[in-house]
Image (cartoon, helix red, strand yellow):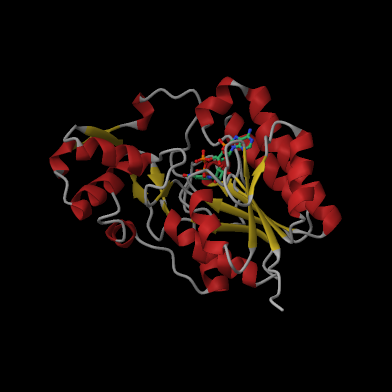
Amino acid sequence: MTKTPPALLLTGATGYIGRRLAPAFQGAWKVFRASRTAAGEGALDLDLGEPDTIRRAFDAAAPAVVIHAGAESDPDACEKDPERARRVNVDAVKALAALCGASGARLIYFSTDLVFDGERGWYSENDAPSPSGVYARGKLAGEEAALVRAPGAVVLRISTAYGRPLGGRPGFIDRLREKLFRGEPVSAFTDQWRTSTAADQLPEVLSRLLADPDLAGVFHWGGAERATRYETAMTFARVMGFDERLVHPSRAVDAKFASPRPRDSSLDSSRLAAAIGVAPLTNEVGFKALRGAW
Ligand SMILES: NC(=O)c1ccc[n+]([C@@H]2O[C@H](COP(=O)([O-])OP(=O)(O)OC[C@H]3O[C@@H](n4cnc5c(N)ncnc54)[C@H](OP(=O)(O)O)[C@@H]3O)[C@@H](O)[C@H]2O)c1
């Protein structure tokens, strides 16, 4: 008789991150993919703004593990509708974490480098968050809910992600690539530092996390390299064979966003790297892996 694999509930299954996690776990886990638009086998209707649907999806999956990658991930959208952002990014995590706590399911909650104010950079898990803006404050409140309500939860803070074009909300590298591909000029900030996360490495990172139930609490996972948006764009153009002269320097201090953006929210990922035996990638190595992806 074949053994039924344990159930894994993945929220945000149609997102930039979720789309690469679901296929990676299918087989070893019975994966339930939950979101408003998830379709096909294993899909569950979930609206994070509607608590009833959270409970229904949870009950239907009866998960041993919940990976919560669902969120309103656009900081500017959160700033424009803080009430909705609170329901989706805070209240929903409270509800989901409480269900995990009550059932004993392990919760892995995706969070963000933006919980830091960006005044110093290269943040470790011991540094105190100091978020500004509705999105960042909500993600930190979600972290607290996960850790308090779901004992043994993992909070995984990642930086701006790039990867194979599978769908979800496009990031900096996706928008950059679109323009460079069309031969259009792009501007990139010389005064904003990030440790860009190779999204296609996340299935391996998550697999290692899932394999070790003793790993709990807050972890950082970015790239190996702290670089400005401009440096990142130049590396991308060079590695992908685009015309580097199309990349122009600009300054974040001169740009206007609805939501504040930290100057330097780079993450030190060494703690998790040591714990799971996986090395984060430099931009050069991560971008080389994407050659031919489009
Ligand atoms: N990508 C990055 O650069 C980055 C950086 C730092 C942190 N993060 C964090 O990583 C996680 C995943 O981000 P992502 O980049 O994959 O985001 P994304 O591409 O914007 O996807 C968001 C996901 O959440 C779902 N979702 C949004 N609103 C929902 C709602 N009201 N009810 C149910 N599902 C909803 C969407 O599904 P439907 O539209 O189908 O409902 C989608 O699957 C988030 O927690 C985000 O804060 C991402």
Residue sticking out furthest to the bottom: 1
Quadrant into which the N terminus falls: bottom right
Residue sticking out furthest to the right: 102
Q: Residue at x 43, y 39 (%)?
A: 263
Q: Is residue 133 left or right of residue 104?
A: left
* Res 27 quadrant in image: bottom right
Image height of 84 relative to 142, above or below: above
Residue sticking out furthest to the front: 1
Q: Is residue 136 left or right of residue 286?
A: right
Image coords of residue 292 (percent x, y) = 25, 55
Image height of 225 relative to 193, above or below: below
- The answer to whether residue 76 is seen in the rendering is yes
* Res 167 quadrant in image: top left
Image coords of residue 68 (percent x, y) = 64, 49
Residue sticking out furthest to the top: 80
Q: Residue at x 52, y 31 (%)?
A: 75
Q: How many marks?
A: 0
Image coords of residue 271 (percent x, y) = 55, 66
Q: Residue at x 48, y 37 (%)?
A: 262
Image coords of residue 186 (percent x, y) = 24, 33
Q: Residue at x 24, y 35 (%)?
A: 179
Ligand 1 quadrant assignment? top right
* Res 171 quadrant in image: top left
- The answer to whether residue 269 is seen in the rendering is no
Of residue 143 and residue 53, the one placed in the foreground of this image is: 53
